[in-house]
Amino acid sequence: MALQLTSDNFQKEVLESKIPVLVDFYADWCGPCKMMSPVVEAVAGTYTGRLKVGKLNVDDAQDIAAGYGVMSIPTFIFFKDGEVAHKTVGAVTKEAFEAEIEHVIG
């Protein structure tokens, strides 16, 4: 299950994580975000221990979203060692999503 990220726990859970982190920047009112939610949850289960998966509501954490240049949602940002490793914007197929994950985590 994906971890709910907030302005309070983002530093610890994402930037200080020992394993790569996928952050789903979303909003409750966003149709494509809702469409990607089952894919994000499936990935969270598949990659347990190799990839931390978190969801950040952009309406609740506008400071973080703005800081990473999130202009459209859903935006998926992969972090590795506290740095942005890869960024994807918009809905994608599960297969394409998993290919990106494999590219990032190796």
Image: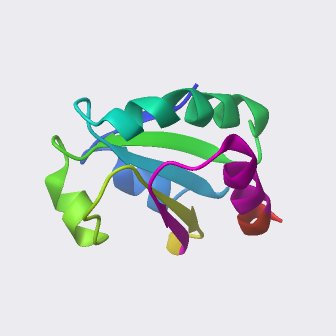
Q: Quadrant of residue 45?
A: top right
Residue 13 in view (yes/no): no
Give the residue furthest to the right: 106
Q: How is the image coloured?
A: rainbow
Front residue of 54 and 18 = 54
Front residue of 92 and 7 = 92
Q: Is residue 44 above or below residue 69?
A: above
* 95 part of magenta stretch: yes
Residue 57 at x, y = what percent?
27, 40
Q: Which residues are magenta?
A: 85-102
Residue 101 at x, y = what percent?
71, 57
Q: Is residue 39 left or right of residue 101?
A: left
Residue ID at (25%, 59%): 65
Q: Quadrant of residue 40?
A: top right
Q: Quadrant of residue 38?
A: top right
* 75 part of magenta stretch: no
Residue ID at (44%, 54%): 90
Indicate the quadrant containing the C terminus: top left, top right, bottom left or bottom right.
bottom right
Q: Is residue 82 above or below residue 6?
A: below
Residue ID at (39%, 39%): 32
Indicate the quadrant containing the N terminus: top left, top right, bottom left or bottom right.
top right
Q: Is residue 88 left or right of residue 11?
A: right
Residue 79 in view (yes/no): yes
